[in-house]
Amino acid sequence: MKKNVLAFSRVTPATVERLQQDFNVIVPDARQGDIAAQFNEALPEAHGLIGVGRKLGRDQLEGAGKLEVVSSISVGYDNYDLAYFNERGIALTNTPDVLTESTADLAFSLVMGSARRVAELDAWTKAGNWQATIAPGHFGSDVHGKTLGIVGLGNIGAAIARRGRFGFNMPVVYSGNSRKPQLEQELGAQFRSLDQLLAEADFVVIVVPLSEATRKLISTRELQLMKPSAFLINIARGPVVDEAALVEALRSGTIRGAGLDVYEKEPLRESPLFQLPNALTLPHIGSATAETRAAMASRAVDNLRAALLGERPQDLVNPQVWK
Ligand code: NAP
């Protein structure tokens, strides 16, 4: 008998079609009524879940007695209560690698966009303000040759560092859990403590996973260590940065600007950040290109399919549950 797969966020028709070859696939549909009710109704019979952007732990999964695997269409997995998954023996998979380059592109567009005030001056131009050569009050900051500080030199951090080092001739410093000798050699990257990095970098790019160790990693003290001319770029997860402290730092000139893709609470519908011209705010689009989202969905299907057919999935986050 075919196993049941339940989607917990919107999935593409191609994803559904591939899964239907081996499984019964249930995709809650707003046109059929309440999405949450459809999800809850299907959950007890589900062997596999696929999707992104939903908190899943004891409260949500207690009734999912047949659940074997959750296939997340993301690389970050802070939405899932891993301890509970391990207790239940539920496998968790994610989609690393396939989004690395697109997310690094987006991080770099935040570096460029905040330094050269791209969105701010686009709005200014379209508002009909351009009447003469612009004055120094609208000048930006250089990117090339400036020091790039990467907090978390993992897959995406390294891809951002390559863009900076080889595209923009930027010296690279990094901080994190461990030294990366190979990347030090490739990029000439130098290891620093977080405090040293904050004091030295012109662009501080946050690319660590969200965990209890990284929650509010950047708060008032850390922002005060940064140069007043420096920019903070966060493409990791919102809660890694204390947002109220960041707003204050942007308002008071403690730092020059920020480029943000992620927030403490998403979607961000209203925020003091919206009043700050030196905050560039994007709606969590690190991996949001057509090509990359398709590749992520395909990788998530591969993982789910493997797990439900009894093969060890390629991207198993909690290998200890795999028997
Ligand atoms: P990764 O390859 O696992 O790299 C994570 C890096 O963070 C590693 O270098 C790791 O150091 C470091 N790190 C982990 N815990 C740390 C801590 N407590 N203090 C300092 N450094 C720490 O992951 P990735 O693929 O680059 O992705 C990184 C994160 O980016 C994801 O977890 C996700 O939350 C976020 N992301 C966001 C978007 C978006 O749309 N904005 C898209 C993709 C990913 P070690 O290697 O020494 O352990």
Image (cartoon, helix red, strand yellow):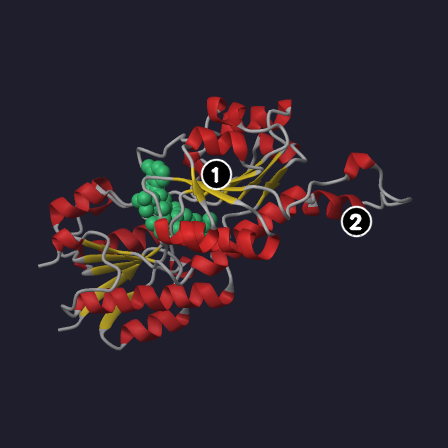
- At label 1, the amino acid type is Tyr
What percent of the width, then of the height, locates residue 229?
64, 32
Question: Which one is in front, 260 or 67?
Answer: 260
Q: Residue 134 occupies which quadrant of the picture?
A: top right
Q: Position of residue 112 (x, y in %)?
A: 63, 48
Residue 202 or residue 59, whichever sits in front: 202
For the point 64% across and 25% down, the residue is 253
Figure quadrant of the N terminus: bottom left
Q: Is 42 placed left or right of 76 in the picture?
A: left
Q: Which residue is mark 2?
A: 126
Q: Earlier in the sequence, mark 1 or mark 2?
A: 2
Q: Is residue 157 visible?
A: yes
Amino acid marked by disc 2: Lys
Of the pair 296 and 27, the residue shown nearer to us:
296
Q: Provide the secondary structure element on which disc 1 rests.
A: loop
Residue 135 in the image: above or below residue 64? above
Q: Which residue is mark 1?
A: 263
Q: Is mark 2 within 8 Å of ligand 1?
A: no
In the displayed structure, 237 sits above or below 288; it is above
C-alpha separation, residue under disc 1 versus residue under disc 2:
27 Å
Quadrant of the image containing the C terminus: bottom left
**Residue at the spot 36% in from the left edge and 34% down from the top edge:** 214
Q: Is residue 196 left or right of residue 270?
A: left
